[in-house]
Image (cartoon, rainbow, N blue to C red):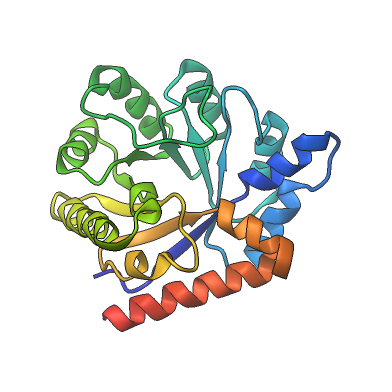
Amino acid sequence: MTTTLRLGVNIDHVATIRNARGGTDPDPVRAARLAAAAGADGITAHLREDRRHISDRDIDRLSAEIPLPLNLEMAATAEMTAIALRHRPHAACIVPERREERTTEGGLDAVAQRAHLTPLVGQLSDAGVRVSLFVEPDARQLDAAKALGAPVVELHTGAYCDAVGERRARELARLVAAARHAAAIGLECHAGHGLTYDTVGPVAAIPTIAELNIGHFLVGEAIFVGLEASIHRMRALMSEARLAAL
């Protein structure tokens, strides 16, 4: 049982809005400062190969100006590895990436990509970067992450969030089982993708999940209530669910 559940705030889509028109506003680094003030435990940013939202300059500034731990989401490429090694963020979450996708679709196949991922995980770990693999809630993927030497996995919650009725219950059961298996084999377990006020509670209640990473919904909700208020409410819902599970 992990009594304290951390919240990582993903500020990618502040940059998406900025890039829609060009210029410098809204500033994702300012959003990171607001997230810190609202009680976020870390900042997540995905530097995509096509730079569709977060830019190299954003990563420079986040590394230099934000006191919270930076979780750099990255594809398993030589370019992104070099950037991570240069900045040495607190954590690097390796995610699958396809140019044509709107957002990350599904988890990394750590089983099939073991040969490719092994040297990358080793380089990052040797540099003091805490490596996480973004995977489906599947025991085979968790076992592969463990074999690769990654200390952390992040479970993809997209299928759970998109499902309704009995299918959502089945997807939640997969997350519960995967989080339990992660703990059993010595992995720290995180979760994220698509979580909202309506879906976060059951995931936050899973006792072996240590961190949730949430972004798009918080940025969207901020249009109506402000970023700090959206984060405060999300934290409250997470805390209520975790305390009820104790």
Q: Quadrant of residue 146?
A: top left
Q: Residue drawn 34% across and 64% down?
A: 203
Report the side of 121 relative to 228 (left or right).
left
Vertical comparison of 48 with 176: above or below = above
Q: Which residue lies furthest to the front in this view?
A: 165
Vertical comparison of 22 with 115: above or below = below
Vertical comparison of 88 with 188: above or below = above
Report the side of 51 relative to 126 (left or right).
right
Q: Which of 9 and 81 is in front in this view?
A: 9
Q: Where is residue 228 in the image (x, y as percent from the top left)?
A: 67, 68
Number of numbered discs overlaid on the protein picture: 0
Q: Quadrant of the N terminus?
A: bottom left
Q: Position of residue 134 (x, y in %)?
A: 36, 40
Q: Nearer the viewer, residue 233 or 166?
A: 166
Vertical comparison of 121 with 25: above or below = above
Q: Residue drawn 77% across and 41% down?
A: 18
